[in-house]
Amino acid sequence: MKKELVALLDYWEKNKGISKEFLIASLEEGLSAVYRKKAMLQDNIEVKIDPETGDINFVDENGNSVTPPSFPWERIAAQTAKQILIQKIREAEKAAIYSEFKKLENTIISGRIERFETGNLVISVARIEALLPQKHLLPRDRFHLGDPIKALLLEVRKPNKGVYPIILSRTATDFAKRLLMDEIPEIRDGIVEIKAIARFPGDLTKIAVYSSNPKVDPVGTCIGDKANRIKNITKELSGEKIEVVKWSSDPEKFTASALLPAVCERVVYDPTKNEATVWVSKDQLFVAIGKKGQNVRLACKLTGWNIVVNRAEGEGPATLLLGISEELAQKLSDAGYETIKSVSEAKSKELSEKINISEDHARELIEAATRQMQDAAGDKKIDQTENE
């Protein structure tokens, strides 16, 4: 048993990185507890193991050897040592995994699809299994057993029975950001800087980039020759569209860039309200708003302020954005409700009286305007990933 114990301790230290001293200390503590319980070992006597020979000794508080208890302690020692080693090795392995992967949080790791569990994906990563929850998959993600996969290491949890220690995500905003860093060496080298990023996972990501080097075009650098760099990232994101815009310290210029591909005729930024008002032509109106309001909402998230889009002068009332008739939009304008914001702040009774509509209809207009203002402000929670 002595030779086997020493050989086993040496093996775990060399191949698994588990300290021999740690295992010996665990064995000594465990054996002392067992002997006190089963052999009435006195409290002032401890078990000590020789790390070179594996000999088990009993010593008092002064370090002097004492006679072992009159008990089949060698047989009990072998059984107990096996149980303690198994337990401590498992604990040490879990602790080592936690320590190793905790350093990799918020980076991209690669693995293979091991199995499916009620919509969630279990990923084989190195020597462990990680969990990619269904809610952290992109809408167009399609994987099969054994497929390679990339994901952001979102969270490393403390070891706990029945819980996967590593949680992955493909919907986190930082997943797109890290893909850009991996794909574009100028970002890794600091030549181009990602100033802001906003994302609707699976649909659209906007990235604001900047370079202090006047000879470097940050947007063109990120897009690459024939858009190859962006295409590679879009492919990894299962078809999610990537838009790269130029960052500016001027809030009005940055607002105009953030709303691309829409062309803004005029932008006025109000620092007291942290709000930018934008005027666009009729043909650019819905480009600026985007499908389901995504373009303006991402622009809000990208800039960090509210953006209100209006139709330029001569293009008709801004309230046409509510999907109402030009006649009703003109009535609103004549009554002083020229913007969607002014409609959202109106009182239903007053509005109904001013433009001669029912109060119920007025409430519907106010609710529609309020929803559009909320969409324009952006959903601040859309990119927050909950750890489950």
Image (cartoon, rainbow, N blue to C red):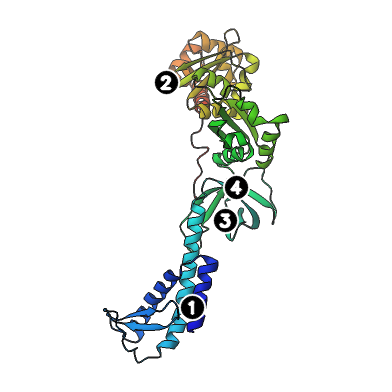
Dot 2 or dot 1, earlier in sequence: 1
Q: Is residue 118 visible?
A: no
User: Which residue occupies the extreme right position in the image?
Assistant: 226
The circle drawn on residue 273 is: 2
User: Pointer 4: what residue?
Assistant: 151
Task: Name the element at disc 1.
Answer: helix
Q: Foreground: 245 or 68?
A: 68
Task: Name the element at disc 2.
Answer: loop
Q: Nearer the viewer, mark 1 or mark 4?
A: 1
Q: Label 2 neighbourhood size at 10 Å, few (<14), some (14-19), many (20+)?
A: few
Asked if the residue under mark 3 is in contact with the one under mark 1, i.e. CB atoms within 8 Å, the reply is no
Q: Foreground: 383 or 54?
A: 54
User: Pointer 3: what residue?
Assistant: 130
Asked if the residue under mark 2 is in contact with the one under mark 4, i.e. CB atoms within 8 Å, the reply is no
Residue type at tag 2 = Lys
Task: Name the element at disc 4.
Answer: strand
Q: Label 1 neighbourhood size at 10 Å, few (<14), some (14-19), many (20+)?
A: some
Residue 312: x percent and y percent? Answer: 58, 11
Q: Label 4 neighbourhood size at 10 Å, few (<14), some (14-19), many (20+)?
A: many
Asked if the residue under mark 3 is in contact with the one under mark 4, i.e. CB atoms within 8 Å, the reply is no
Q: Measure the alpha-carbon separation of dots 4 and 2.
A: 38 Å
User: Pointer 1: what residue?
Assistant: 6
Q: Measure the alpha-carbon separation of dots 2 and 3.
A: 44 Å
Determine whether 14 is above or below 351 in the image. Answer: below
Dot 4 or dot 3, earlier in sequence: 3
**What is the tally of numbered marks visible in this picture?**
4
Q: Is residue 89 visible?
A: yes
Dot 1 or dot 3, earlier in sequence: 1
Dot 4 or dot 2, earlier in sequence: 4
Q: Foreground: 237 or 62?
A: 62
Q: Nearer the viewer, mark 1 or mark 3?
A: 1
